[in-house]
Amino acid sequence: MRLTDVVSSALAQILANKLRSFFTLLGVIVSVTFLVAVVAIIQGMNAYVRENVAGAIIGANSFQVRRTPINFARFSDDEWRRAQRRPKIGPDDAAVIMAAIPDAEAISLQSGWPTPQADVVWGNRSLGDALILGVTPAYQTVQDYRIAQGRPLTDVDVAERRAVVVIGAQIAQTLFENVDPVGRFVRVLGEQFEIVGVNARKGRVLGQSFDGFVLMPITRFEMLYGRRNTTTISVKMREAAEVAPAMQRAEEALRVARRLRPAEENNFSIETSDALVAFWKTLTQVLFAVLPAVVGIGIVVGGIVIMNIMLMSVTERTHEIGIRKAVGARSQDIERQFLAEAVVLATLGGLLGVAWGWGLAGLVAQLSPLPARVTGWSIGLALALGAGVGILFGVYPARRAARLDPIAALRAD
């Protein structure tokens, strides 16, 4: 019997029992749908973090000097305790790096994580949970901020600890609407600050606004919040190719300034956007670790259902099997026929699951800030799972059908 005949006969049997076939495939469909949709969301978020979030925090032509690393998940408990004992990053370290990298486009010092949040109040209006950032003026260049109104922060503001702020576009729109904010005063933690500038809109990332912040001189910030343990130095080079050599110069200069011996490890971390992407991928690996177990349970359940239905089909079609053997069909032809039905059935479940998963991923992307990106390997894996389930759980019913005695089968009702 030719392969095309086997497949067409299998399809005819499936179409003759549409409802039963659908419920037989439900376990495979749900498992494959879950696989495709979850992988699409994880891959979409990985791509989004790599292309948008990481670039927004640490640009492709920038790097950061931090007290502790971004990707702390790769640290053991002992390594993390040692990292917590590192000296704080401060203005002296920034001065060392400025001397070591005079060709940098900008070198900034900014308040570290966790970034404090506070209500920003103007008159009887307030905006809650705005990000309060203490920075040096160069931070605005590092982050590619553009001033839409007024002026940016200056070195004089930092030196004189002035109570001035530059606000994000969201704060300006929410508090002031059509009123010009420049020159007006807002209250942060009960203190009055003069608005000297408004940043141009940056937009949203994963539903989180990049415009709900208040920039103030880092010296004034430290009067409110004290020195942060994770204050960060950001270095922006003119070209991405200059980042690696600049990182090496920064590392050498800081090791000398901190009197570290050659055998001693760095008591600081130098990070690029790759570190942020790696940290995110570490987090998503947890989801990938759980995914096979969840999908596997569904696939096994679906496979058992397929096997039971195929065994029932063998019982129902015993007389048909006897007739086929009587007119010359070999045992291997019968086995191939029933195995093909199981494989085609499971593969159809895989195809439906891929379609449903693709649609579910698109729906999530439309109705939530989560991005989704369906990948070819997840589709291939889903279809391979479907076919594999058909082969694995279809072998036993197919062999049972093939071993039926033709005379006994002909006598069956």
Image (cartoon, rainbow, N blue to C red):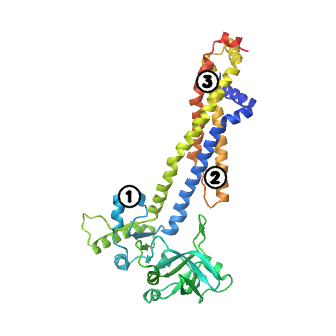
Q: Is residue 244 visible?
A: no
What residue appears at the point 50 percent right and 82 percent down from the top-left corner? Answer: 216
Q: Is residue 345 visible?
A: yes
Question: What residue is shown with label 2?
Answer: 361
* Crowding near the residue tagged with mark 2, few <14, some 14–19, many ≥20 C-alpha atoms within 10 Å: many
Residue 40 placement (x, y as % from top left): 59, 51
Q: In this rendering, would 136 be left or right of 52?
A: left
Question: What residue is shown with label 1?
Answer: 75
Q: Is residue 330 above or below residue 171?
A: above
Report the amino acid beneath label 3: Pro
Q: Report which quarter residue 302 is drawn in.
A: top right
Residue projecting furthest to the front: 190
Q: Earlier in the sequence, mark 1 or mark 3?
A: 1
Secondary element type, mark 2: helix
Report the amino acid beneath label 2: Ala
Q: Are marks 2 and 3 in contact (CB under 8 Å)?
A: no
